[in-house]
Image (cartoon, rainbow, N blue to C red):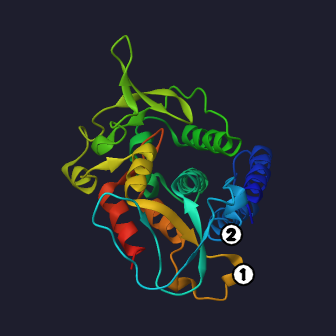
Amino acid sequence: MTIESMAHAVASLHDKLVESDRLSNDTSIMTQLQETVKICLHSIDNSDIANGLDITEKTLDPISRTGNLETNTSCSPLVLQPRESGQVWLIPVSSFIEQLHVTCIYQGFLALSDNSLSLADLMTPFRFLLATVDRNRLISFFEAALNARLSQQRLEGWDDIPFFSLGGAGTKSTVSATCDGMTTYVGRFHEPARVIKDPLSDLSTRVKEDLDGDWLDMQDLERLLRQKVQHFIALPLQSSSRSSEKNIGVAGLIKRLVDKAVCLGRSPGFRRYDVEKALLSNWH
């Protein structure tokens, strides 16, 4: 399966959503939603990701998986390398980030569209936006963001969706001041958006403790990964008979990151501690 397969499935889903007035208790659409997620995630962990994310053959060099992983304590990048012998495909950080971003948006759309989930169920990942806009508006935003990413277009409009700078997220290079003194969040995939600098100020002590720490937006995460990782690896389809538990799969890493992610409005947010823990778990 390729990224084209995912795009086709999402387009088909979009048509059904329009026809059914957003799920509208239609279990068949929910089933297709789940199947589409499987397509998204399955496309990560096989060699078709090379074509799906426009990775050239030069960047997908097979590497020999012999010996133990050698961790580098310096600042130089690392190559994720398992212990077993055989071959895997190298996946550039940029391609991993692309797949992670699309998966975050799609999983968010799925959760928000699931009528079996109450607002209380959605509060942990969507706390900030649900205090700003209603659920239907949020579903529309995620749908538009997903369509924009899959069609490789810039997301325009949505002025009511800000960026929440939780734990310093986005302040490294994506937040700037305009000529009128207003702070804006600048991203590659959307128009500049206003910034909420301290989204925890009005929340309870318990919530502040739960969300404590250094947080990263999507672009912060990419910079961090470039410092620590040179490539990610995925097991080729022809080697699928080997136990996937003995190999480093990008699907597993993406699942860990998505499970811990928080919606910061214009970007997914990841706690640095969770990212580093997820990386270490893949270096065993």
Please say if 71 is above or below 242.
Answer: above
| Residue 60 x, y percent position in the rendering | 63, 64
Q: Quadrant of the N terminus?
A: bottom right
Q: Label 2 neighbourhood size at 10 Å, few (<14), some (14-19), many (20+)?
A: many
Res 32 seen here: yes
Q: Which mark is residue 47?
A: 2
Residue 68 image-quadrant placement? bottom left
Residue at 40% across, 75% down: 283
Closer-to-camera residue (168/201): 168
- Answer above or below: position of 53 versus 189: below
Mark 2 and mark 1 in contact? Answer it, CB < 8 Å: yes
x and y, in percent, of residue 212 in the image:
24, 52
Drawn side of residue 7 relative to residue 224, left or right: right
Distance from disc 2 to disc 1, alpha carbons, whole Å, reads 9 Å
Q: Looking at the rendering, which quadrant does residue 225 occupy?
A: bottom left
Classify the position of the C terminus by image quarter.
Answer: bottom left
Q: Identify the residue at image location x=43%, y=73%.
A: 282
Residue shown at 38% from the left, 11% from the top = 179
Residue 97: % across, % down: 53, 53
Query: What element does badge 1 sit on?
Result: helix
Comparing 209 with 163, the one in front is 163
| Observer-nearest of 179 and 161 | 179
Tell me which numbered mark, 2 or 1, is placed earlier along the sequence. Answer: 2
Q: Secondary structure at mark 2?
A: loop
Mark 1 is on which residue type? Answer: Gln
Rendering coords of residue 148 (x, y %) = 66, 39
The one of 66 and 46 positioned closer to us in this rendering: 66
Dot 2 amino acid type: Ser
Q: Indicate which disc residue 120 carries.
A: none
The 10 Å Cα crowd at callout 1, few under 14, some 14 to 19, many 20 or more, is few
Q: In the displayed image of the protein, which residue is found farthest to the top?
A: 180
Q: Determine which of the numbered discs, if any, sits on residue 238 in the image.
A: 1
